[in-house]
Image (tube, helix red, strand yellow):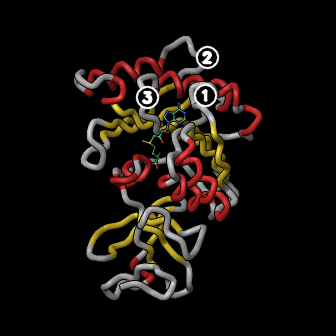
């Protein structure tokens, strides 16, 4: 069922009380006959990637977070202790058209956080810029994430890096950015895509090697791994990593 604003309403008669806090800025509820995680729409009246929107009686909107479209979403569905809060200052590497960034922006919209969204392709950057016009806590940055020294002037202080980049040197990109943007004890959330590093090697071996590089390297920053998550069944051959800078 769709309302006059084009927002999907649940077919079943779910009540507001059915929705409850899942974690800081993220809600959970059984809607449309299944378990969903949702974020409060910081840009009411708009969906970003065709996701369903639950319209509350008070007029606020909650956007369903599709874990199959988002590595960060998959981490939440896996019940990871994700260190993002509404006041977080986040450097997001590999923003694409903003599917996941939009949910991060929703969470930050419940506080005073900000997300710098780095993407190096022109086409998705155009979508990001349009998205940012309606979301003031989102700053698009057109840049190559493997050259963080070039965008230091464009990015303010952050306390967390999230990275979702399909490149062969994923650990190196994370460490080089941490050198410029993270202090000791601050968090990295990284999605490692095994097939972008080695198409034939066993993903478990690829993950082990990348973790080792995160822990010890010559790139100016290294990490202590807090926890890892296999992102299947949402994303095959992807590992979610939560780590702190040493
Ligand atoms: C898997 S997609 C990201 C999806 C996005 N995180 C989401 O959940 O909505 C990876 C993105 O990283 C971008 N990318 C790859 N290498 C990059 C680099 N060196 N610097 C910046 N962006 C890069 C690609 O253009 C692509 O849009």
Neighbourhood count class around disc 1 (C-alpha, 10 Å): few under 14, some 14–19, many 20 upward: many
- Residue beneath disc 3: 167
Q: Which of pointers 3 and 1 indicates the residue nearer the eye?
A: 3
Q: Is residue 130 shown above or below 72?
A: below
Vertical relation: 187 (above or below) 111: above
Label pair 3/1, CB-CB below 8 angstroms? no
Mark 1 or mark 2: name the one nearer the start of the chain.
1
Spot the residue most to the top: 218
The answer to whether mark 2 is within 8 Å of ligand 1 is no
What kind of element bears circle 3?
loop
Where residue 106 sits in the image (x, y, percent)? 57, 62
Check disc 1 and report the residue beneath it: 178
In x, y percent, where is residue 159?
A: 65, 40
- Dot 2 corresponds to which residue? 220
**Pointer 3 or 1: first along the chain:** 3
- At 53% from the left edge and 48% from the top edge, which residue is drawn? 124
| Closer to the camera in the image, 119 or 65 | 119
- Tell me whether circle 1 and circle 2 mark residues in contact (CB < 8 Å): yes
Q: Residue at x 45, y 22 (%)?
A: 169
User: Looking at the picture, does residue 145 appear above or below residue 59?
Assistant: above
């Amino acid at each position: 069922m769709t309302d006059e604003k084009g927002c999907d309403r649940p077919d079943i008669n779910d009540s507001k009380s059915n929705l409850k806090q899942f974690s800081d800025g993220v809600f959970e509820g059984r809607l449309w006959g299944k378990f969903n995680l949702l974020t409060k729409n910081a840009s009411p009246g708009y969906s970003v990637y065709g996701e369903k929107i639950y319209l509350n009686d008070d007029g606020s909107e909650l956007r369903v977070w599709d874990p199959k479209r988002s590595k960060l979403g998959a981490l939440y569905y896996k019940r990871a202790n994700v260190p993002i809060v509404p006041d977080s200052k986040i450097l997001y590497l590999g923003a694409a058209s903003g599917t996941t960034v939009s949910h991060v922006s929703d969470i930050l919209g419940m506080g005073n956080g900000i997300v710098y969204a780095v993407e190096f392709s022109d086409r998705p950057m155009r979508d990001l810029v349009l998205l940012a016009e309606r979301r003031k806590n989102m700053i698009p940055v057109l840049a190559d994430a493997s050259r963080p020294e070039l965008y230091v002037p464009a990015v303010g202080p952050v306390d967390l890096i999230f990275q979702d980049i399909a490149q062969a040197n994923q650990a190196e990109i994370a460490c080089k950015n941490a050198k410029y943007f993270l202090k000791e004890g601050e968090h990295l959330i990284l999605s490692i895509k095994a097939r972008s590093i080695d198409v034939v090697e066993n993903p478990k071996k690829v993950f082990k090697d990348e973790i080792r590089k995160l822990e010890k390297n010559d790139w100016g920053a290294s990490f202590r791994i807090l926890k890892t998550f296999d992102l299947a069944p949402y994303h095959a051959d992807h590992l979610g990593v939560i780590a702190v800078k040493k």
